[in-house]
Image (cartoon, rainbow, N blue to C red):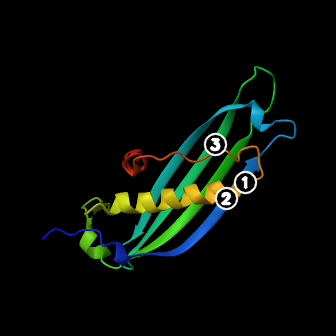
């Protein structure tokens, strides 16, 4: 029988915002925003012996204004770190000869999904009261985050 992710065996042990920067220029109003441009960087590190996964998500967002004036755009940079304990990690990770891990059962997808969706909520609350308050991190396929690596 192949190993699979069991949600009850995934535990979020720690969450940290290690960087949070919001630049909201004084004279830049919400009415200036045409749309938002966002880029996410995601990576994971593993401790097979202790069953730990560290997921790091860096989110950069900036406004694209309606006008062609010299207004400074609003910008957001957040870096969030998640530490997960996976009870059946040794069943889901195979150590390869080059010392990398091959994750089975959709584990990478599950970790990326949890980290990204939690980050969406964090940003939603943290951006209230700023010119970026209407930005919502878009829903994506978590495999896109994983595939970037």
Question: At 53% across and 61% down in the image, what residue appears?
Answer: 118
Q: Is mark 3 on a helix, strand or loop?
A: strand
Q: Mark 1 points at which residue?
A: 128
Q: Do the residues labelled 3 and 1 touch (CB within 8 Å)?
A: no
Q: Could you tell me which quadrant the N terminus lies in?
A: bottom left
From the top left corner, tell me how far across and down residue 116 is, in percent.
49, 56
Answer above or below: position of 102 versus 84.
Answer: above
Q: Do the residues labelled 1 and 2 touch (CB within 8 Å)?
A: yes
Q: Are marks 3 and 2 in contact (CB under 8 Å)?
A: no
Report the side of 18 relative to 32 (left or right).
left
For marks 1 and 2, give the CA distance.
6 Å
Q: What element carries label 2?
A: helix
From the top left corner, tell me how far across and down residue 4 is, in percent.
24, 68
The extreme top residue here reads 68
The extreme right residue here reads 26
Q: How busy is the neighbourhood of tag 2: few (under 14 within 10 Å), some, or many (20 plus)?
A: few
Question: At 69% across and 57% down in the image, what residue appears?
Answer: 126
Question: At 63% across and 55% down in the image, what residue appears?
Answer: 123
Report the side of 144 relative to 12 (left or right).
left
Residue 90's quadrant in the figure? bottom left
Q: Is mark 1 on a helix, strand or loop?
A: loop
Q: How many marks?
A: 3
Residue 93's quadrant in the figure? bottom left
Q: Mark 3 points at which residue?
A: 61
For marks 3 and 1, give the CA distance.
15 Å
Q: Mark 2 points at which residue?
A: 125
């Amino acid at each position: 029988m192949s190993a699979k992710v069991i949600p009850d065996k995934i535990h979020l042990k720690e969450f940290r915002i290690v960087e949070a920067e919001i630049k909201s220029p004084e004279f830049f109003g919400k009415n200036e925003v045409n749309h938002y441009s966002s880029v996410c960087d995601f990576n994971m590190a593993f401790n097979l012996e202790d069953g730990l996964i560290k997921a790091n998500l860096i989110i950069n967002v900036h406004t694209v204004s309606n006008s062609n004036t010299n207004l400074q755009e609003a910008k957001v940079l957040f870096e969030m770190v998640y530490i997960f304990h996976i009870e059946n990690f040794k069943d889901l990770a195979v150590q390869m000869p080059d010392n990398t891990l091959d994750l089975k059962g959709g584990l990478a997808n599950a970790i990326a999904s949890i980290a990204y969706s939690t980050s969406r909520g964090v940003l939603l609350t943290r951006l209230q009261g700023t010119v970026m308050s209407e930005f919502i991190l878009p829903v994506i396929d978590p495999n896109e985050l994983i595939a970037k690596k």
